[in-house]
Image: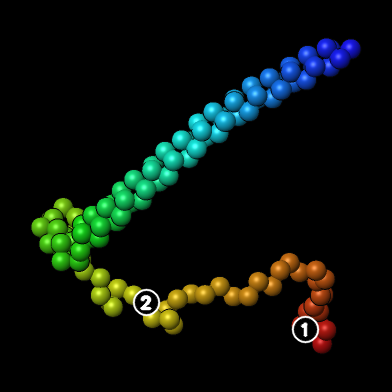
Amino acid sequence: MRNLALAVLVMSVMALALWAYTENYATKVTLDKVTQLNEDIVIAQSRVRVLKAEWAYLNRPERLMKLANANFDDLRLLQITSDHFARIEQIPFPGPDLGPIAEPIEVMNRENSQ
């Protein structure tokens, strides 16, 4: 009986050692993936910064003005001025939403009532 208990104890220690070994390497693989993802994030952030700088460079007003003037025959682009905007009085705002008529009111004809 004592040998059986000792054998079970040895087998359980070996099983736990195997489990700890596999968990250790699974953890290392996961940490390597996290490190790689962090490096990818840093690279992506630097690419975004470069793209934002390029976008700002390409959207300089003087450059866009030169392009618009050079391609005026094809595009017919004009510079936006304050004349291109409407005054607040010219904007048709919708009236208040009155909703559906719940209780109609009968109106008598004035010509027939007299």
Q: Residue furthest front?
A: 2
Q: Is residue 97 visible?
A: yes
Question: Horizontally, is 30 left or right of 79 in the view?
Answer: right
Q: Nearer the viewer, residue 60 or 101?
A: 60
Question: x, y (%) of residue 88?
Answer: 43, 81
Q: Is residue 113 above or below residue 48?
A: below
Report the mark closest to the observer, 1 or 2: 2
Residue at the limit of the structure toward the left, as seen here = 70
Q: What residue is shown at x 86% (from left), y 15% (from top)? A: 2
Q: Label 1 vs label 2: CA separation?
A: 45 Å
- Which mark, residue 110? 1
Q: Position of residue 95 (x, y in %)?
A: 59, 75
Q: Is residue 52 above or below residue 39?
A: below
Residue 77 appears in the figure: no
Q: Amino acid at mark 2?
A: Ala
Residue sitting at 43 percent across and 44 percent down? 38
Instruction: Say what secondary structure mark 1 lies in.
Output: helix
Q: Quadrant of residue 21?
A: top right
Residue placed most toward the observer, 35 or 8: 8
In this orientation, which residue lies closer to the viewer: 3 or 106? Answer: 3
Residue in the foreground of this view, choosing between 95 and 103 = 95
Single out the residue that lies furthest toward the right. Answer: 1
Q: Is tag 1's residue or tag 2's residue first in the polypeptide sequence?
A: 2
- Give the labeled residue for mark 2: 86
Give the mark count: 2
Drawn side of residue 109 relative to residue 88, left or right? right
Colouring of the image: rainbow
